[in-house]
Amino acid sequence: MRLYFDVNTIIELVEGPGASLDRFAGLLAGGRQTGAVVVTSELSLAELLVKPLRDQDLHLVIGYNSLLAGGTAGQIEAHPVSRDILGRAARVPNRKPSTKLPDAIHIATAEHAACDAIITADRRWRDATAIQLTDPADFDFATFIEKRR
């Protein structure tokens, strides 16, 4: 199962109540053991770093860079914003004209990466993709992993 995590989902799992970078990294590692792959766009890194850089939170800056660096267990599969993805993103507003370019890039990345679901709280994505959208409030990553074991 390939799950696309929007930035709001990653922030909630890392910075939300009771959350932490270490707990999220552990969940990612557990997910990989069950065959679940978490995907996002490299665009997410820029979006994730805005607040930690403003707050001078070096721990979060390093943590987010590590999570999206790829290559080691427990990290997110971050896809570059390629010409192919940009071309796909340009077509997303044809399906839903109100779609903003950053959202279109995320949707195009999820489609390009053959994701089975997109975990996002952004309701504006409805009708912009055929991929199943799931609100993070309705998605418990730890329970999802346990059910797959």
Image: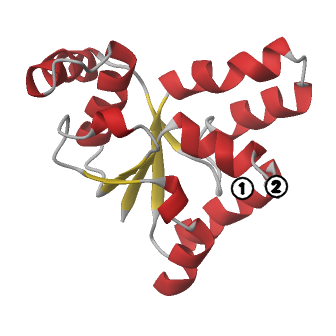
- What is the quadrant of residue 80 in the picture? top left
* Label 2: which secondary element: helix
Q: Is residue 22 left or right of residue 72?
A: right
Q: Is residue 11 left or right of residue 23?
A: left
- Give whichever of 36, 4 is nearer the camera: 4
- What amino acid is labelled 2 in the image? Asp
- What is the quadrant of residue 30 in the picture? bottom right
Name the spot of residue 89 as percent of width and height, x first: 23, 21
Name the spot of residue 143 as percent of width and height, x first: 57, 77
- What is the quadrant of residue 105 in the picture? top left
Question: Dot 2 surroundings within 10 Å: few (below 14), some, or many (20 or more)?
Answer: few
Residue at point 32% right, 16% down? 100
- Give whichever of 121, 65 is nearer the camera: 121
* Label 1: which secondary element: helix
- Give whichever of 94, 67 is nearer the camera: 94
- What amino acid is labelled 1 in the image? Ala
Q: Is residue 3 left or right of residue 77?
A: left
Residue at point 39% right, 18% down? 102
Name the spot of residue 6 as percent of width and height, x first: 48, 39
Q: CA–CA distance between discs 2 and 1?
A: 5 Å
Quarter of the picture containing the N terminus is: bottom left
Colouring scheme, one of rainbow, by chain, secondary structure, one colour: secondary structure
- Give whichever of 108, 67 is nearer the camera: 108
The image's mark for residue 37 is: none
Q: Which residue position holds label 1? A: 25
Disc 2 to disc 1: CB gap under 8 Å: yes
Residue at point 42% right, 37% down? 122
Q: Which residue position holds label 2? A: 22
